[in-house]
Amino acid sequence: MLSPNKVKDSQIKVLLVESSLIPRAGLRLIMEEDSFIKVIAETDTLNETKALIGGKKPDVIVYSPRQDYPEAQKHILELRLLFPAVRILYLVNHENQSVLLEAVKSGVSGIVNYNQSPEIFVMAIKQVAGGAIWIDKTLMAQALDEYINTKESELKEYERQKIESLTPREKQLIGQIGNGLRNKEIADKLRISEATVRHHLSSVFSKLEVKDRLGLVIYAYNHDLITNKNVDKT
């Protein structure tokens, strides 16, 4: 990795990994129009990439997988493990957020969409070479939205499973607590002992991950657990 100052004063050595000849030629022309970037080698295979890195010692790998993205993530991870000092700029021609997130996890230093301008592409190379992380703002926003939506879905599923773990009697108990009844009143209402009420209450606290009755009431109202159906009318 070059220091930010060195990036300004010397050429950035780039290894271009692109499987298609015409796009590869186009990318090379774009990069070589900038006097601070030098394409030192080109390839389309992982094995040759590893050999070239060892001999050419590039500062940045511009990696453009055209298919089999899960395999591409494995390649990126392997390159990062073998050559941790080399920065990887990932060129993509799609907006599959799960793929992009996996690429970030694999250790890429930057992601640029093919729809971006040549100027943005060159700028990304320079930023990555200087140690920065470059991810297209639009792609990042979309990736974050998907990540947040995924986490929200996972949280809803987790809460659903917690609620489903409640027994009918425990749900009945929650209804009575929602009506403001104390343990003795609940015991009398449900015709069980206070010890049994305390046992059910402890189980409910554990299953719903709440600390006290107030926390239980708040949780129950937020998740529609306190309704007339929960209350024993007898």
Image: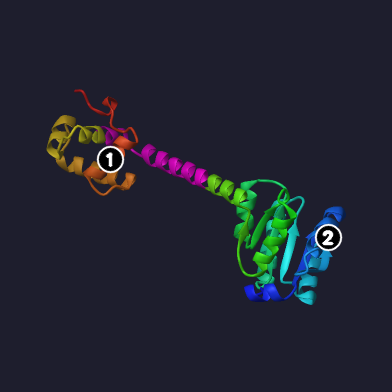
Apparent side of residue 22 relative to residue 190 in the rendered image (left or right): right
Q: Quadrant of the N terminus?
A: bottom right
Residue occupying image coordinates x 33% and y 44%: 208
116 or 87, nearer to the observer: 116
Q: Is residue 63 above or below residue 141?
A: below
Q: Quadrant of the C terminus?
A: top left
Q: Residue 23's spot in the image, x, y percent?
A: 83, 53
170 in the magenta segment = yes
Callout 2 secondary element: helix
94 or 11, nearer to the observer: 11
Residue at image mark 2: 29
Q: Main secondary structure of the magenta part?
A: helix
Which region of the structure is painted magenta?
148-172
Q: Is residue 74 above or below residue 152?
A: below
How many discs appear?
A: 2
Res 162 → quadrant: top left
Callout 1 secondary element: helix
10 Å crowding of disc 1: few (<14), some (14-19), many (20+): some
Res 27 → quadrant: bottom right
Find the distance from the CA under tag 1 to the CA under tag 2: 63 Å
Residue at image mark 1: 218
167 or 213, nearer to the observer: 213
